[in-house]
Structures are given as structure tokens and as C-alpha cells.
Image (cartoon, helix red, strand yellow):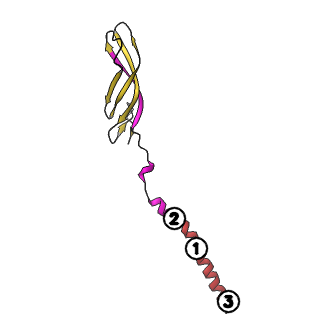
Amino acid sequence: MNEHMNERILFTIGLAVMLILSIPFYALASTTDNTDDSDTELVRSKSITHTEVYNGNVDPPPRYYNYDSGAWHGTLELARYKYDGIETKATYKGTVYCTDDVCPLGEDGGAYN
């Protein structure tokens, strides 16, 4: 009877250990299966510098430039300008915003999505 009782105690302890060890794996599996897109930050804006060329001496050029290129839109502010005797080159800076589902980064074809 003593041997039979030892077997039951060992079986109970083994079962309890297996149960305790399986709980973290179950919890890990349940949190891994949940996908939450709120962690993913979509980039929808970028800072740019844009140069606009005007014929002749435009002094001063417009203070603001409405940027509209593909998915990117925004109002840029005049940063500096220079007349070279033929044309006026105005440099505008600011933030533009993407309004599409896929936002191209630029000439290299990369994209934010």
C-alpha cells in the first residue's frame, strides 16, 4: 500500500508540474494570436524643400507655395530666393501630407503604406 500511495503522489505532483508549466505557453499563444494594428504608426507626412523657378526678376516671390505632387499635398513657406539676372529661384520649405493608401517617398520609388 505504501508503494501504491507513492505512485499516486508522484503522479499528482507530475500532473501539477505539467499543468503549471503549460500555463505560460497558453498565455503566450493567446497574446501572440491577437493582432492589434494600433501599434503600427503610418507615416503620412514628411518635411520637404522645393525649388520653384520664376522667369525674370520676381521680387519678392509668393510667400507660400501650394505643393501638389502625386499623393503629397501641402502649403510650403518661402525660405529664400535669388535672382541671377535671368530667373528667380525660390526655395520653399514645409510639411506635406499624404492622402492616399500608399505614400511614395520620392524618386527612388520607395513607399510608406
- Is 18 drawn above or below residue 46 in the view shown? below
Structural crowding at the residue carrying mark 3, measured as other residues with C-alpha within 10 Å and reported as few (<14), some (14–19) or many (≥20): few
Amino acid type at mark 2: Ala
What residue is pinned by disc 2? 27
Q: Which residues are magenta?
A: 28-53
Structural crowding at the residue carrying mark 2, measured as other residues with C-alpha within 10 Å and reported as few (<14), some (14–19) or many (≥20): few
Mark 2 to mark 3: distance in Å? 37 Å
Q: Nearer the viewer, mark 2 or mark 3?
A: 2
Q: Picture quarter containing residue 95?
A: top left
Amino acid type at mark 1: Met
Q: Nearer the viewer, mark 1 or mark 2?
A: 2
- Is 2 drawn above or below residue 99 in the view shown? below
Please state which of residues 13 and 97 is positioned toward the viewer in this rendering: 97
Mark 1 or mark 3, which is nearer the start of the sequence? 3
Q: Secondary structure at mark 2?
A: helix
- Is 73 drawn above or below residue 19 in the view shown? above
Q: Secondary structure at mark 1?
A: helix
Residue at the location (64% across, 85% down)? Answer: 7
Mark 1 to mark 2: distance in Å? 15 Å
What residue is pinned by disc 3? 3
Q: Nearer the viewer, mark 3 or mark 1?
A: 1
Q: Secondary structure at mark 3?
A: helix
Viewed as shown, does residue 35 lie left or right of 72?
right
Mark 3 to mark 1: distance in Å? 22 Å
Mark 3 or mark 2, which is nearer the start of the sequence? 3
Residue extending furthest bottom?
Answer: 1
Residue extending furthest top?
Answer: 85
Image marks 3 and 1: residues in contact by CB distance under 8 Å: no
Q: Pinpoint residue 59: horizontal percent, then vertical percent.
A: 35, 11
Viewed as shown, does residue 83 lie left or right of 32?
left
What residue is pinned by disc 1? 18
